[in-house]
Amino acid sequence: MVVLMYMIMNNEKYEVIITKKNNKNKYMRVKEDLKIYVTANKWVSERQIEKVLKSNYDSLLKMINNIKKKNASIEKLTFLGREIDVIGLSTQTKPEIYGNKLYVKDRSKIDLYYKEISYDIFKERLDIVYNKFKENIPYPSLKVRKMKSRWGVCNRKNNTVTLNTELLKKDIKYLDYVIIHELSHFIHFDHSKKFWDVVGYYCPQYKILRKEMKE
């Protein structure tokens, strides 16, 4: 059985996750996600656990501060335009984002994790943007990969749109613009005035966004 409570230390609120088992002793530790994990006997009450937490206040605070210092040197990335911390957890089975932190198993595989995360986000935005189009265009298959020189690619032969995983680092308005750009190629495959008229209809500020992305 898992019980959740909270503890206030230095005016900050920390989650306390209590796992009750058949063990005799109580154990507590703070993990890199800054949550306090307590393992106790199933008959121990929450009030008793609260007393133990309070009696170990200084030790817990020291553990929290040590982890914060460690996290301060952790690599920072941007996610949809905001800065996030990348935290490595050996127990993490898949990349997950909570608030301004990305939890991964191996920080050396960030590109792989970004690719995993990007597909669902890009697919959601593709659906939203596609449904805005009044023209009769095919619904494309989505591919994601890291590209060095292009933000997106439209392939009309097999009805696919490929988006650069680096877009995951940009504000969502840039992602939407690239999707609009690629979908507009199903109407006009060149970059003629008619093409840009379509882009401008669905993204009036495209010139500003395009300039900012080039910079």
Image (cartoon, rainbow, N blue to C red):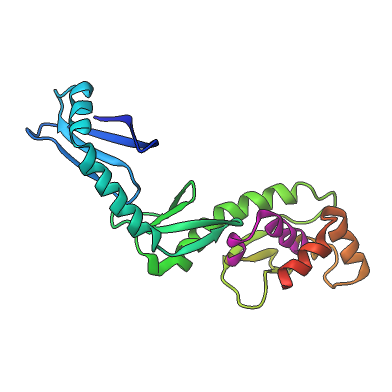
- Residue 42, by quadrant, is top left
Magenta: predominant secondary structure element? helix
Is residue 91 rendered to the left or right of residue 130? Answer: left
Q: In which quarter of the image is the N terminus?
A: top left
Q: Percent from the top left, x then y, of residue 175?
A: 68, 58
Residue 88 at least partly seen = no
Q: Percent from the top left, x then y, of residue 90?
A: 28, 57
Q: Percent from the top left, x then y, of residue 187?
A: 84, 62
Q: Which residue lies furthest to the bottom in this view?
A: 149
Query: What's the magenta region?
Result: 166-182
Q: Residue furthest right?
A: 193
Q: Does the magenta-highlighted stretch encompass residue 172?
A: yes
Is residue 143 rendered to the left or right of residue 108? Answer: right
- Residue 73, by quadrant, is bottom left
Q: Quadrant of the C terminus?
A: bottom right
Is residue 187 rendered to the left or right of residue 27? Answer: right
The residue lying at 60 percent from left, 74 percent from top is 147
The residue lying at 74 percent from left, 59 percent from top is 177
